[in-house]
Image (cartoon, helix red, strand yellow):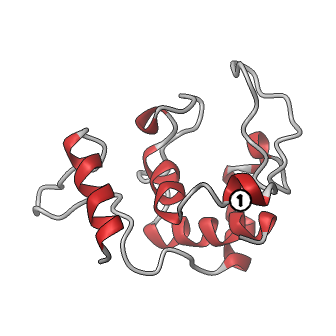
Amino acid sequence: MNMRIALMIAALSLAGIVQADESGGDICVPEGALRGDAQRGAALHLQHCAACHGADGRAEVIVMHMDEPPRDQSDPAYMKTLPDEYLYLIICKGGAALGKNYIMPKYGDVISTQDIRDLLAWIRTFSGT
């Protein structure tokens, strides 16, 4: 694990965002290869994400109870500011856990870690980042 990821995990652990499970391992820890199969991620995105983020990540949808829509995931300048570790965590832990909108659910209890990796890979195709 590289130093940047280790520091991010340590900080998130102190903040209570990354927690140990009963076996002592970490849940929702972004480690290893974080980008999975983008094609598999496309179907998952349509099922779980497109209603709020749009089918193409542009968030050109109206979402109830949101003061502002999700950011445009097809914007390369914006997406370059978000490390894969951050995207993995927000998918796994949800928006509220990372100071974003509470409407973004936590999917770590719903889909597998491989599904999260596949979603991340698909989301990156929108911006080419």
Residue displayed at 80% across by 54% down:
75
- State which quadrant residue 4 falls in: bottom left
Residue displayed at 34% across by 66% down:
5
- State which quadrant residue 27 falls in: bottom left
Report the residue marked by disc 1.
45
Quadrant where the C terminus sits is: bottom right
- Relative to residue 31, is residue 83 depicted above or below? above
User: Residue 56 in the image: x percent, y percent?
Assistant: 85, 57
User: Residue 52 in the image: x percent, y percent?
Assistant: 75, 40
User: Residue 74 in the image: x percent, y percent?
Assistant: 81, 57
Q: Residues within 10 Å of mark 1 (few under 14, many from 20)?
A: many
Q: Nearer the viewer, residue 39 or 58?
A: 58
Residue displayed at 50% across by 48% down:
90
- Relative to residue 72, is residue 7 depicted above or below? below
116 horizontally vs 22: left or right: right
Q: Nearer the viewer, residue 95 or 45?
A: 95
User: Residue 42 in the image: x percent, y percent?
Assistant: 75, 68
Q: Nearer the viewer, residue 95 or 9?
A: 9
Quadrant where the N terminus sits is: bottom left
Total numbered badges shown on the rendered structure: 1
Q: Is residue 27 visible?
A: no
19 horizontally vs 104: left or right: left
Q: Secondary structure at mark 1?
A: helix
- Relative to residue 97, is residue 22 depicted above or below? below
